[in-house]
Amino acid sequence: MHTHLGLTLNADKTHSTHWREKVRFLGYELEGRSNPNGTGWLHLALPHEAMRNMTAKIQQATRYPQAPEYEVFRNINAIARGWSNYDRSAHTNTVAGGKLSLIIYWHTVHYLSTRHRCSIAKSMRTSYASDPKTGCVALYSYKPAPPQTPEQRSFIWHKTLPRISRAAKTAPTVNDSTADSTTNWAKGRSDHQKLTTRTIADNRCESCGRSDEPLVVHHPHRLAKAKRVKAGMGHVAHSGIAQRTKLRCHTCHMQHHHHVKDEGCAGGKPDAAQVARPVWRGLGGDRRA
């Protein structure tokens, strides 16, 4: 192999053993088994350490009740989606997926009960319904965009994808979505708040009404100057969630913080359409919709 391909074996990743002994390789636990007629076959299983690591990630994602529901649900779905897409070739995929769905359900329902200060039964009455895509009942949360209709529901991961056979002739299709989790809410910049602010402002600057410039979510009070209550960064997260954020263009944003004025901007004067918008009561108090 070294002569023809120029490759060498890594001693740490090379192991010679009997085919019936379990071997860890690429996140799977490989074991040789034989049928009653003597035919040998390879059994792929998920290690117990992988399930413990998944449980720890779910616990961390649902640890803080002050975290917005939208971001908690998105983080859990990203973790479960990455696991299910990668481990679909395991023979124990269905069993492990059932265990994972129970772990996700109980940690999520406890998070909702703690966040809303209610019982688990009440959380199920208000956040438990049938998913039209899978036909299974699961926990859900509304997306951060009014109005809160059944079409705006975001369901938690609850159904394992079918196993992929090693003899499959066609490549499987996966949900090509962002698989990374975010904790921007802990820094005072919640994605839930950003989407809500953009929806209410109709993707227009709330100071001058422009929409042809990059828009930013503006916090009236600097997060770095938030009053510290106790050790840690909890005061920053609380300040970012409690503030009534506004959507502003780059020019108006710079003008507010650095007093830099641009002649092409209306200088903080809203247009007629901006003034005529109704008021919507939502996150952060009364806002113009």
Image (spheres, rainbow, N blue to C red):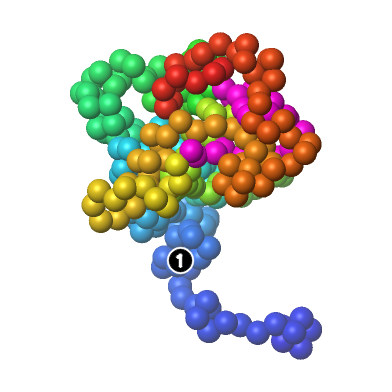
Q: Position of residue 3 (x, y in %)?
A: 76, 88
- Give the camera-side residue of 28 and 141: 141
Q: Residue, x 29% and y 22% (percent of image)? A: 123
* Highlighted magenta segment, given as a residue range: 199-220
- Give the camera-side residue of 228 and 52: 228
Specify whether 52 is left or right of 13.
Answer: left
Against 8, is 76 above or below?
above
Q: Which residue is outermost to the bottom?
A: 3
Q: Position of residue 230 (x, y in %)?
A: 23, 52
Q: Is residue 218 visible?
A: yes
Q: Work out which quarter of the rendered image holds the N terminus and state it.
A: bottom right
Against 28, is 104 above or below?
above
What secondary structure is marked by label 1? Answer: strand
Q: Quadrant of residue 185?
A: top left
Mark 1 closeness class: few <14, some 14–19, many ≥20 residues within 10 Å: some
Q: Residue, x 50% and y 33% (percent of image)? A: 245
- Give the camera-side residue of 232 and 204: 204
Q: Position of residue 208 (x, y in %)?
A: 68, 28
Q: Which residue is mark 1?
A: 24
Amino acid beneath label 1: Arg
